[in-house]
Image: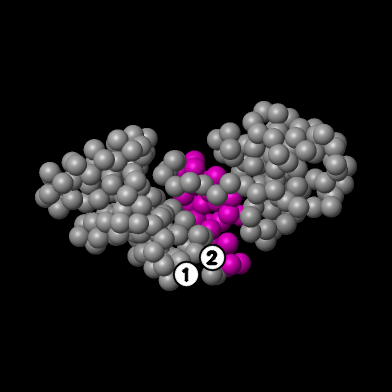
Amino acid sequence: MKSIYPFILLSIFATAARAQTGDADRCAKGEGEDAIAACSEIIAAADGDVTWALFDRARAYFNARMYGSAISDLTDVLLKKKDDVEALENRALAFQALDDYQHAIGDFSRLIDLQPSSANAHRERCWARAAWNRDLDDALEDCDQALSLKPGDVLVLDARCLAEIRKAAYAVAISNCSAALGADPNLASSYYLRGVARRKSGDAVRGDADIDSARNRDSNVVKAFILMGVKP
């Protein structure tokens, strides 16, 4: 599902192998077509280790919402550095942006094996499982683990709310979304999810008010959840 959570932007490798050239600077710091072209020129020349250029081109692809191309470059990075946690995390996020939750969960699982204390990885695997509507008990365990590592994280509460709605545990979902909104009163996804949970609990008036609040803050969030099958 796209645009619900702010994806973690791809960072830039710090490496002595990076040449101090105009193309390297454009590749590392640029955006859009210019950065992609600069990185592509460096990769095509293949002078030494250009893993950093693949990573930076993936960053440019990711930010341009060319997620399939980002996945391809990050896969090449992982062929060379199979345990690179930044490449794993960002490939998972790119899969998630394409609604490919199965592959996203696989990458988040590898990341958790490498970094079991990563709250973000547990949170995102919770979200992916809830969005995919699979392994919901495992999703809730992930959210609980994320909250133990990062108490009060509004995005964990939001993801937990979605998982509870998938399980038809509407009262608990309302509680989680309300807690998220208590910390961030502008979180459109929690308004929408709470609205859905309230309507399914028979509280149409407050449910509709929440859904209107979500739509006023970010209409794309409402559309994305509807496409996911999360409807009042």
Please indicate, yes or no, whether residue 164 appears anywhere in the rendered image: no
Disc 1 designates what residue? 149
Question: Magenta residues: mostly which secondary structure?
Answer: helix
* Quarter residue 230 falls in: top left
Secondary structure of residue under mark 2: loop
Going by the numbered disc 2, the residue's amino acid type is Ser
Q: Is the residue 17 above or below the residue 27 in the image?
A: below
Residue at screen point 72% across, 57% down: 81
Mark number displayed over residue 118: 2
- The quarter of the image holding the N terminus is top left
In the depicted view, which residue is nearer to us: 154 or 47? Answer: 154
For the residues bearing labels 2 and 1, Cβ distance under 8 angstroms: yes
Q: Earlier in the sequence, mark 2 or mark 1?
A: 2
Left or right: 77, with 203 as reference point: right
**In the rendered structure, does residue 92 fall within the stretch colored magenta?**
yes
**In the rendered structure, does residue 221 fall within the stretch colored magenta?**
no
The part of the chain drawn in magenta is 88-115
State the separation of the CA atoms marked 2 and 1: 8 Å
Q: Is the residue 160 above or below the residue 221 in the image?
A: below
